[in-house]
C-alpha cells in the first residue's frame, strides 16, 4: 500500500464539488464563506498533521493508521459526512478539529453522545438505560430561549430517544459549552438528588457564571420532563444539591476541554474511574476520531468504504475466487 496519502485512496465515485457555484450574489471576486472555512481548516490541519508526522505516530500503515489517514486527508471533500450516529452528523471538516492543539467542535461532542447512547442500546437488551447522554444542542436551545418546555421534551427527552423509562434513569449527562470556547459537563444524579459539575479548566472569573448556566439548563430540563411525563416524573432538579468537585481531573493545556468532557461521559457511571482520568492529548484525539468512524452505529461508514478502496481491505472481507 502506498504511503502517499494523495494516492492511497482511489476514489470510485465522487460527485464534483459545487462549492464554486455557491458564492453569495453580488459579491463577485470575493472568496465565499465556504472557501474561507475550507482554506482555514486546511491551514490549521496541515500544521497539526506535521506535528503527528514529527512524533512518528503514522509511520506504520496499520488498520487504524489507514482509517486515520482517510479521515484527515484534506485532498478528499471536507463536506463529506464521515460520522452519522442517531441523527448527529460530523463531516471531514469537523473531524479535522481532532488534530493536535485544535478546539473541538460541538458536532464531535454530540456524535460521541449519540455513540454512547447507541452503545448503551446494544449492551442493555430490553432493559432501560441507566444513563442518558444528551447532545449539547439541548442546552444551547435552553440558554438561548429558542425552545418551549414542550419542544424540549419532544425533541430531546422522549423515552424512545434516550432509552427506556425515565424513572429507571439514574444519570443524565449534559455537555455544556461556555462562550463558544470551553466545554464542561453537568451530570444529574437522579437517585442521589445532586448535580455534579465536572469542569476540566475552572476559572475564578467564570466559575459562578458557569454554575448558574448549568442550573438554568437543569431547571429547564426538569420542567420539560415534568411537562412530558407528568406525575410519572417525581424529581425537581431545582431542589438538587450542585457540587463542583475539587478532585475533578484537569486539562493541562487550553484546547482539550472537550476531550475531558467526552471522557467524563464515558466513565461517569463509576466515580472512581472519573478520578483516574488521564489524557495524552494527541493519542486521545487520534483514538476518538477512529472510534467514532469504526463504531457499528456509524451509518456513514459503509458509504465511505464503498467509495474509497483503501478502506475496503479493512472493513470488507476478501472473498476467494
Image (cartoon, helix red, strand yellow):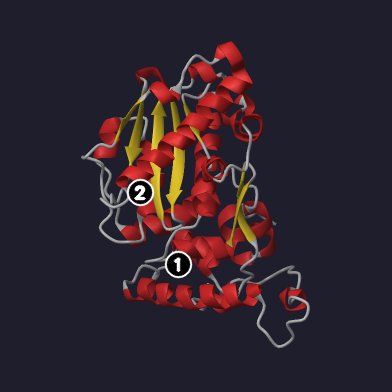
Tell me the quarter of the image containing the C terminus: bottom right
- Category of crowding for the residue at label 1, using alpha-carbon neighbours closer than 10 angstroms: few (below 14), some (14–19), many (at least 20): some
Q: Is residue 265 visible?
A: no
The image shows residue 131, relative to residue 55, as above or below, that is: above
Mark 1 sits on what residue?
61
Asked if residue 4 lies left or right of residue 258, the reply is right
- In depth, the one of 219 and 54 nearer the eye is 219
Say what secondary structure mark 2 lies in. Answer: helix
Residue at 34% across, 33% down:
196
Residue 229 coordinates in the image, percent (x, y)? 60, 18
Q: Horizontal and vertical percent for residue 55?
A: 31, 72
Q: CA distance from mark 1 to mark 2?
A: 28 Å
Image position of 251 with respect to 153: above or below:
below
* Image mark for residue 164: none
Question: Looking at the rendered structure, which numbered label has been put on residue 260?
Answer: 2
Q: Residue at x 28, y 44 (%)?
A: 277
Indicate whether 290 appears above or below 310: above
Q: Quadrant of residue 147?
A: top right
Q: Position of residue 121 (x, y in %)?
A: 55, 30
Is 263 left or right of 87, judged from the image as shown?
A: left
Q: Position of residue 141 (x, y in %)?
A: 58, 43
Residue found at the very far bottom of the displayed protein: 29
Q: Secondary structure at mark 1?
A: loop
Using the image as rendered, state which of residue 62 and residue 69 is in the foreground.
69
Residue positioned most to the left: 247
Depth-wise, is mark 1 or mark 2 nearer the camera?
Answer: 2
Amino acid at each position: 500500500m502506498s504511503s502517499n496519502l494523495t494516492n492511497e485512496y482511489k476514489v470510485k465515485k465522487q460527485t464534483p464539488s459545487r462549492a464554486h457555484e455557491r458564492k453569495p450574489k453580488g459579491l463577485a471576486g470575493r472568496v465565499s464563506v465556504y472557501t474561507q472555512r475550507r482554506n482555514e481548516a486546511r491551514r490549521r490541519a496541515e500544521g497539526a498533521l506535521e506535528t503527528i508526522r514529527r512524533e512518528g505516530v503514522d509511520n506504520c500503515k496499520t488498520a487504524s493508521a489507514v482509517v486515520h489517514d482517510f479521515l484527515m486527508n484534506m485532498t478528499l471533500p471536507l463536506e463529506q459526512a464521515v460520522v452519522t450516529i442517531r441523527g448527529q452528523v460530523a463531516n471531514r471538516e469537523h473531524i479535522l478539529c481532532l488534530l493536535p492543539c485544535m478546539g473541538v467542535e460541538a458536532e464531535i461532542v454530540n456524535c460521541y453522545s449519540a455513540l454512547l447512547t447507541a452503545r448503551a442500546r446494544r449492551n442493555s437488551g430490553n432493559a432501560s438505560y441507566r444513563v442518558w447522554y444528551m447532545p449539547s444542542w439541548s442546552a444551547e436551545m435552553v440558554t438561548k430561549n429558542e425552545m418551549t418546555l414542550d419542544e424540549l421534551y419532544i425533541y430531546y427527552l422522549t423515552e424512545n430517544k434516550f432509552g427506556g423509562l425515565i424513572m429507571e434513569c439514574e444519570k443524565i449527562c449534559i455537555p455544556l459549552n461556555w462562550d463558544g470556547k470551553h466545554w464542561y459537563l453537568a451530570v444529574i444524579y437522579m437517585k442521589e438528588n445532586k448535580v455534579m459539575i465536572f469542569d476540566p479548566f475552572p476559572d475564578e472569573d467564570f466559575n459562578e457564571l458557569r454554575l448558574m448556566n448549568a442550573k438554568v439548563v437543569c431547571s429547564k430540563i426538569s420542567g420539560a420532563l415534568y411537562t412530558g411525563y407528568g406525575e410519572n416524573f417525581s424529581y425537581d432538579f431545582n431542589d438538587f444539591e450542585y457540587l463542583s468537585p475539587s478532585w475533578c481531573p484537569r486539562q493541562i493545556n487550553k484546547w482539550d476541554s472537550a476531550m475531558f468532557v467526552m471522557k467524563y461521559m464515558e466513565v461517569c457511571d463509576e466515580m472512581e474511574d472519573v478520578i483516574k482520568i488521564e489524557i495524552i492529548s494527541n493519542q486521545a484525539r487520534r483514538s476518538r476520531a477512529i472510534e467514532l468512524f469504526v463504531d457499528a452505529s456509524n451509518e456513514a461508514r459503509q458509504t465511505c468504504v464503498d467509495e474509497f478502496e483503501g478502506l475496503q481491505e479493512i472493513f470488507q472481507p476478501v472473498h476467494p475466487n
